[in-house]
Image (cartoon, rainbow, N blue to C red):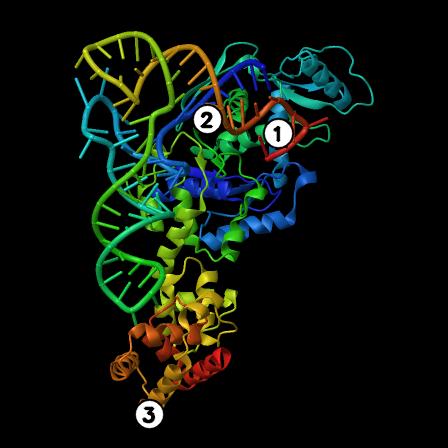
Amino acid sequence: MIVTRFAPSPTGFLHIGGLRTALFSWLLARKNGGKFLLRIEDTDLSRNSEDAMKAILKAFDWVGMDYDGEVLYQSKRFDIYKQYINQLLSEGKAYKCYMSKEELDALREEQMAQKIRPHYDRRYRDFTGTPPVGISPVVRIKAPLEGVISFKDGVKGEINIAASEVDDFIIVRSDGTPTYNFVVAVDDALMGITDVIRGDDHLYNTPKQIVIYQALGFDFPRFNHVAMINNEQGKKLSKRDGATDVMEYKAQGFLPEALLNFLVRLGWSHGDQEIFSIEQMQELFDPKDINKSASSYSLDKLLWLNSYYIKESTNARLVVLLKDFGIDLQGNSKSDLILRATKERARTLIDLAGQICLLIESPKSYDEKAMKKVCKEDTRFILNDFISAIKSKSPKSKEAFHDLLQDFVAQKEIGFGKIAQPLRLALMGELSGAGLDEIMEIVGNDETIKRVEKFILAIS
RNA sequence: GGCCCCAUCGUCUAGCGGUUAGGAUCCAUGGUUUUCAUCCAUGUUACCGGAGUUCGAGUCUCCGUGGGGUCACCA
């Protein structure tokens, strides 16, 4: 059985890079009827944040990704790690190191000055003397002294790293807590993880974790290191690049399926296909189709996907979603008409809300450029006559408004634009939007007249 | 700096030794539409450079160049 996991550290919100690796892992598990675990890497007690934890869970919930079993916390598994530490210690595969942090820093500094790679000099590796007093030791793993650590990466292929690049790294801090590279290896092994999918910033952790696997006699999983997501300038994504927090996308009016579809195509592809439903992703995802190179993040495609998914959404769902954007269409008898008139034109829910606003509220201002362009001397008289026409015919349907408009221009022997443009401005405050007949059907006779009258006043 | 990874239109990508280098997005143009948008059609734009292997190289090899990652008692 395939078992995958997402293992964030609770130090901040879930960012889109994290969401993508989570998505890949989730898809792989779901595709194969396997398990997807959520494990919180909170061994560094000083860096944990409850809020970050909640934010991650919230983001998962929003995009609709589920996980199997309970959320696993490494901070609750310290006794398990301790057991394995003791095992390594007693087998001589790990050792206590009494070097103080200050000494270590000094060593590092000296090495940097000599322009050699900073590394621990293994001074306590074979130490047999009496340990210095008053120092709480760390525990270090005995990494191989020579040779090459190799593994086959599902994305990058064969990776070989010289053992000399891997230090006797710390597996237990002086405060007794175990460190990341140790607990990851232990947990992945103990939890039966078969496939690890993570960012390629972890590529260098892999040989370290392999050292642990080997010391403990565990088999190691398949590794897949996914290249990073960069910003539009090709640089590492940072907070300065706008939305990196997954929940920020919700706030900006994106649909979760649009975000997921966007992310799944960042670094992964299936031929020429662009649109993937969640079901299709689950069916088609395969780590072998993950791209080796980093990708730059560009909003265009996300916007395009989002407008696609807005059009695909049922009106009922949009009504619910729109509530977060200040639009309450619940119980509005014209909600279907309103949505039909607006959803084709919206790229985000914020867009959509804005357009709906124009329909249900009288314009607060009129586009000035458009006013100048569209309003001629006779405009107010034409509009006045149009009000009379509405009053005498009192149209109710889109079709009736359509006919009224046609009859009106025919009778007055004027071009359609003569009435249509100013009318549009009067009703919406701008020159774009749904069809006039549609708008008037939604707005209704009385409100149409009111808006036109208000507009006439404004141009007189 | 050492080590590792990467390199096709602006962007996301297909390609897996022989293609007019394909799709999507963006942009432009035309059509549909009472405007805008949608939709449809068309178009501009790419194999980082140099050697080599080969009858033939975007595809394989090497060297450059560029970008990224990593070198913590963070994860």
Q: Residue at image x 38%, y 59%? A: A310
Q: Is residue A204 above or below residue A80?
A: above
Q: Decide which of A27, A372 is in the foreground and name it.
A: A372
Mark 1 vs 3, N-terminal side: 1
Q: Are marks 3 and 2 on the same chain?
A: yes
Mark 1 vs 2, N-terminal side: 1
Residue under pointer 3: A392
Tell me which amino acid carries mark 3: Ser
Query: What is the chain letter for disc 3?
Result: A
Q: Secondary structure beneath disc 1?
A: helix
Q: Secondary structure beneath disc 2?
A: loop
| Residue lying farthest to the front in this orientation | A377
The x and y percentages for residue A404 are 28, 83
Answer whether residue A374 is visible to the viewer in this image: yes
Image side of residue A408 versus residue A16, left or right? left
Q: Residue at image x 70%, y 30%? A: A176
Residue under pointer 1: A83
Q: Quadrant of residue A92?
A: top right
Q: Are marks 1 and 3 on the same chain?
A: yes
The x and y percentages for residue B64 are 46, 14
The x and y percentages for residue A60 are 49, 50
Q: Which mark is residue A132?
A: none
